[in-house]
């Protein structure tokens, strides 16, 4: 058993008969009253986000997880196929367990968290950013660059991303997987 002082980002805990991953936390020590920990947790079974407050010293049950490197192979309907790069074992995960499935490119490396008690995959950690090629973008209007104007562009995985007006078809761009937003253009 752990306590609230052990809470950190990425920690998996059992709460309300479900397994949650801590995505955000804040230790609060008000001037009056007892300290507490405000958390934002994501359910690893259904993907719902729950905000919860634990009083200081509250006992929490941690779930032991191992992280393994997997390579994304291909999609099949709502299922995504991955291969363990060490053992070459293949697993199939539902789209709901992935944070940004629309940004996954075949061959991309991800980290999969596996519950050591049941050997079932719990969560997929995407890389912080991915580099994708723009397959469709409206042409930018000359002279319309005084402001931070953006336009929608479609990337090779089919996802739509808002990009600056100077981005054209064939450009490679870096995308933040947490927010799905444009970071920069990659020069070759």
Image (tube, rainbow, N blue to C red):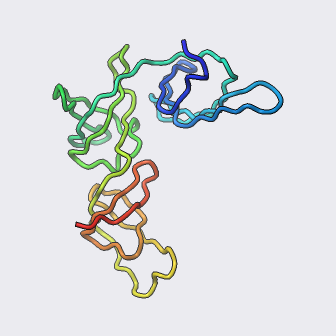
Q: Nearer the viewer, residue 49 or 148?
A: 148
Q: Quadrant of the C terminus?
A: bottom left
Q: Nearer the viewer, residue 153 or 3?
A: 3
Q: Position of residue 52 (x, y in %)?
A: 64, 30
Q: Residue at x 65, y 32 (%)?
A: 27
Q: Position of residue 32 (x, y in %)?
A: 83, 30
Q: Nearer the viewer, residue 65 or 137?
A: 65
Quick check: 170 above or below 82?
A: below
**Residue at far left of view:** 88
Q: Residue at x 55, y 22 (%)?
A: 6
Quick check: 4 above or below 147?
A: above
Q: Residue at x 31, y 57 (%)?
A: 158
Asked where in the image residue 187 lies, by quadrant, the reply is bottom left
Q: In this rendering, would 8 be left or right of 184?
A: right
Q: Residue at x 25, y 29 (%)?
A: 91
Q: Position of residue 104 (x, y in %)?
A: 30, 47
Q: In this rendering, would 88 be left or right of 98?
A: left
**Residue at far bottom of view:** 143
Asked where in the image residue 67 lies, by quadrant, the reply is top left
Asked where in the image residue 121 lies, by quadrant, the reply is top left
């Amino acid at each position: 058993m752990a306590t609230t002082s052990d809470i950190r980002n990425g920690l998996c805990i059992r709460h309300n008969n479900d397994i949650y991953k801590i995505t955000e936390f804040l230790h609060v020590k008000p001037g009056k009253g007892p300290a507490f920990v405000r958390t934002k947790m994501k359910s690893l079974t259904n993907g719902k986000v729950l905000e919860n407050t634990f009083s200081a010293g509250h006992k929490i049950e941690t779930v032991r997880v191992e992280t393994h490197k997997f390579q994304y192979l291909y999609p099949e309907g709502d299922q995504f196929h991955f291969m363990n790069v060490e053992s070459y074992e293949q697993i199939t995960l539902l789209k709901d367990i992935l944070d940004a499935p629309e940004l996954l490119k075949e061959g991309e490396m991800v980290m999969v968290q596996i519950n050591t008690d049941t050997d079932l995959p719990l969560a997929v950690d995407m890389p912080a950013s991915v580099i994708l090629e723009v397959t469709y973008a409206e042409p930018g209007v000359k002279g319309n660059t005084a402001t931070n104007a953006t336009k929608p562009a479609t990337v090779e995985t089919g996802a739509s991303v808002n990009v600056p007006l100077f981005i054209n078809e064939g450009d490679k761009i870096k995308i933040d997987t947490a927010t799905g937003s444009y970071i920069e253009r990659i020069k070759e």
